[in-house]
Image (cartoon, rainbow, N blue to C red):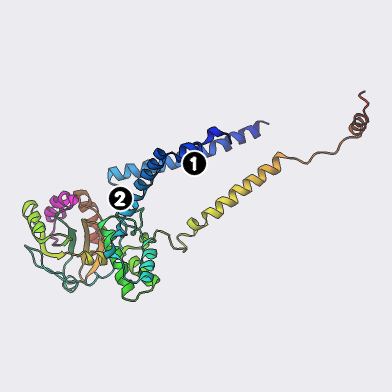
Amino acid sequence: MTSRAGPSPGLLASPRMVALLAALAAGLAMPMKAGAVSDPSEMLADPAAERRAEHIGSRLRCLVCQNEDIEDSGADLARDLRHAVRARIAAGDSDRQVMDWMVARYGQFIRLQPRLDTDTLLLWGMPALALLAGGGTAALAARRRRPAPSPLAADEEERVSRLLEGDPS
Amino acid sequence: MSTSLGRRRLLALSPLLVAGGAGIGFWRMLHGMSGGSFDPHDVDAPVLNKPVPSFDLPAQAPGRGFSAAELSGLRAPVLVNFFASWCVPCVVEMPALLALPSMLGRPLPVWGIAYKDRTEDASGFLQRSGNPYTRIAADCDGRTAIDWGVSGVPESFLIRPGGIVAWHTAGPLSSGMVTEELGPALRRIGA
């Protein structure tokens, strides 16, 4: 709101600031670039097939790092699994067949996004359940806090009308 | 009035309780990881209770290579162990592998698979640390390991006669694990 809330446009545009921002941006971009798939020799020649491989890879867990997908992971095993995905695609597998190939070897754990089945129903339903519980609690609280105003008694009505007419007594 | 105040206090406390619960859960997880009772990498392999995946691997000196057919044709159980010279936990588990027969009170042949290793590195490692393996194969590109669902070395699979995977661990074998898990698994398959 006020001028103190952020750097002034003058400061942002100063050459030193621009250089600093550029250095920061380069620093941020570096580790992403170093991420595994930057090696062109790994990629499929057909851009559409490569896009499919990247999409599948982004849904596969790296079993070494466990919270990274194999497209982002620098682990050796992730590189081997990227190769395997591309080999399956080159052999003519559909996306689903590649996924099933991986699950057959590493189990459901390799899916970064768990499949919806009876085991994961509660997991997938949790956001809706949380919203329902929160909304229900809020609605109950709102209803309790504001009881309907009771109608004025006869003497109160009389006093109100007197006040409105400007009679202070 | 007092009940509404109590309810408000409870409501204000509930985020703290949730955070506290999460904290306790996290602490238990870390405690289990340092104590060895919880290992996030020890995920049940889908190959468990299934026939060994098909493969035929060349020899790794000083042993002879082997294939899935040879494993399936065995009349006695065998432990298949993926290892590598570059893997520190493999050095750690070597004494347990070498002492396997005395700890189990019965012979159990161990067949090794050198995972993504150079031939001379793997043979040098076995010269230094001792060689517990009856047969040794080389999985140079790691493709066979992927078919087994190996996520890292060392990993061990107990193969029952007929070539079915009966037990699996994704981590170094310890004497405790041998007596508490591998021994009972051997007795379960009755071999």
Residue under label 2: B39
Q: B145 and A95: which one is in front?
A: A95
Q: Is residue B45 above or below residue B74?
A: above
Query: How far separated are the C-alphas under marks 2 and 1?
Result: 25 Å
Query: Is residue B48 at all visible to an observer of this figure?
Result: no
Q: Disc 2 residue type?
A: Asp
The x, y position of residue A2, in whole percent, is 58, 34
Q: Which residue is rendered at x = 23% and y = 66% of the image?
A: B143
- Mark 1 belongs to which amino acid? Val
Q: Please report, as a chain letter, where disc 2 is located.
A: B
Residue A94, placed above or below residue A31: below
Left or right: residue A107 versus residue B174 is right
Quadrant assignment for the N terminus of chain A: top right
Quadrant of the rendered structure where residue B125 is?
Answer: bottom left
Residue A96 quadrant: bottom left
Asked which quadrant contains residue B22, the reply is top left
Q: Looking at the image, can residue A107 be seen? A: yes
Q: Is residue B109 magenta?
A: yes
Q: Is B168 one of the magenta-colored residues?
A: no
Pointer 1: what residue? B18
* Label 2 Cα neighbours within 10 Å, binned few <14 / some 14-19 / many ≥20: some
Which label number is shown at residue A2?
Answer: none
Whether callout 2 and callout 1 share a subunit is answered: yes
Question: Which region is colored magenta?
Answer: B86-110
**In the image, residue B174 lies at what x, y percent?**
20, 50
Q: Earlier in the sequence, mark 2 or mark 1?
A: 1
To which chain does the residue with label 1 belong?
A: B
Identity of the residue drawn at 46% across and 39% down: A12
- Label 1, secondary structure: give it: helix
* Residue positioned 31% across, 60% down in the render: A37
